[in-house]
Amino acid sequence: MIAVTIKDIAQLANVSIATVSRVLNNSKPVRPELRDKVMRVVEETGFQPNAIARSLVNKETRIIGVMIPDISNNFYSNLLYGVDSVISEYDYSMFLAISDETVEKELKYLRLFKEKQIDGVILASIHFLEGNIHSLHEMQVPMVVTGHDLHGYQIPTVNVNNVQASYDATAYLISQGHRRIACVSGPLWDPPCGLDRMGGYRKAMRAHGLPIPEGFVAEGDFTPKSGYEAVKRIFEEKERPTAIFVATDLMAVGVLNYLHDEGIRVPDDVSVMGFDNLEIASLTRPMLSTVHNDPYMYGRAAGEQLLKQLRNEPIERMSTVPHDLVIRQSVKAVL
């Protein structure tokens, strides 16, 4: 089968190549009779426009670059579903990059996005250093960041209010009678999951006049293993907590495993509250109480904000997705 080109269409319809391009790309008005001639030949030949050629004419690729740190984490896979649900409605495709939480890979993929001349970029929970932010500006393409707020830069962001959500989770533990509450925070290089979620915990403790004993806050790195090691350090202190707020559900799994290994009953001896409401939260035993933080809505909001930029429509500098508490079996009231 011989491939049909735009030049062939022009010759068969007895019109100029420019006219064919205008019809196929709907870029400029064309007289109805000429449009009919071109479309008749297109239909007869079964012509399919080449995407690369079309991108050269339109100066667009209809491709959105999306960078996430970890595909095995259900949060990010659900976020991708949210992005795709929006961009696919407008005939955009996704170019996926997985950074493994390394700055080097993030920079590599940003360069690749630029080389591919993609139309826009969504960056999820980037592990970016302040000195590398200029790389984002050098791309000069519409962009949305999720999970971070790049203070001082006019890059639209989508996030949950991590401080308020963590405050609410800690305040719920306090409302159940707990006074000695520990915190396993996210890594401090990640402001939303590290500083902000720990900040919400501290804010709630201060607001209720409760002390935070030395050693009651330990840092993890998102993984169950780090949650295991963090809560182990907490329980090596003289004073033990009756409740633990954990900044991610994956780390909470490690916390539950440690408590199980030590014969510490949940929730009879210690209550545990997670964050994110991943699928695994309902699969643990006991089932994990947590903060519902819908990644699908993250993805939809990011996709919508990016499409607004591509259409030159007004955008929000910061978009906040809602949160609420999901109470299951891992929290118990104390007298």
Image (cartoon, rainbow, N blue to C red):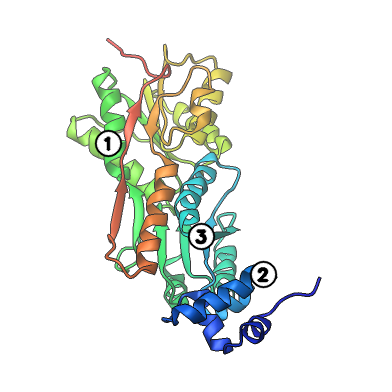
Residue 232 position, x and y percent, is 51, 30
Q: Report the quarter where the C terminus lies.
A: top left
Can you say whether 99 is above or below 159 in the image? Answer: below
Give whichever of 250, 179 is nearer the camera.
250
Residue 91 position, x and y percent, is 51, 60
- Find numbered disc 3 in the image and state the secondary structure of the residue it sits on: loop
Q: Is residue 201 visible?
A: no
Residue 97 sits in which quadrant?
bottom right
Q: Which residue is mark 1?
A: 167
Which marked residue is nearer to the observer: mark 3 or mark 2? 2
Sequence-first tag of 3 and 2: 2
Q: Residues within 10 Å of mark 1 (few under 14, many from 20)?
A: many
Are the two marked residues, 2 and 1, in contact with CB atoms closer than 8 angstroms?
Answer: no
Q: Which residue is mark 2?
A: 44
Q: Which residue is mark 3?
A: 91
- Name of the residue lying farthest toward the right: 1
Amino acid type, label 2 = Glu
Distance from disc 2 to disc 1, alpha carbons, whole Å, reads 65 Å
Total count of labels: 3
Amino acid type, label 3 = Asp
Give whichever of 7, 329 is nearer the camera.
7
Which marked residue is nearer to the observer: mark 3 or mark 1? 3
- Find numbered disc 1 in the image and state the secondary structure of the residue it sits on: helix
Q: Is residue 166 visible?
A: yes
Instruction: Tell me what residue is drawn at x 46 percent, y 26 percent.
Output: 235
Can you say whether 229 is above or below 57 in the image? Answer: above
Residue 226 sits in which quadrant?
top right
Amino acid type, label 1 = Tyr
Q: Residues within 10 Å of mark 3 (few under 14, many from 20)?
A: few
Which marked residue is nearer to the observer: mark 2 or mark 1? 2
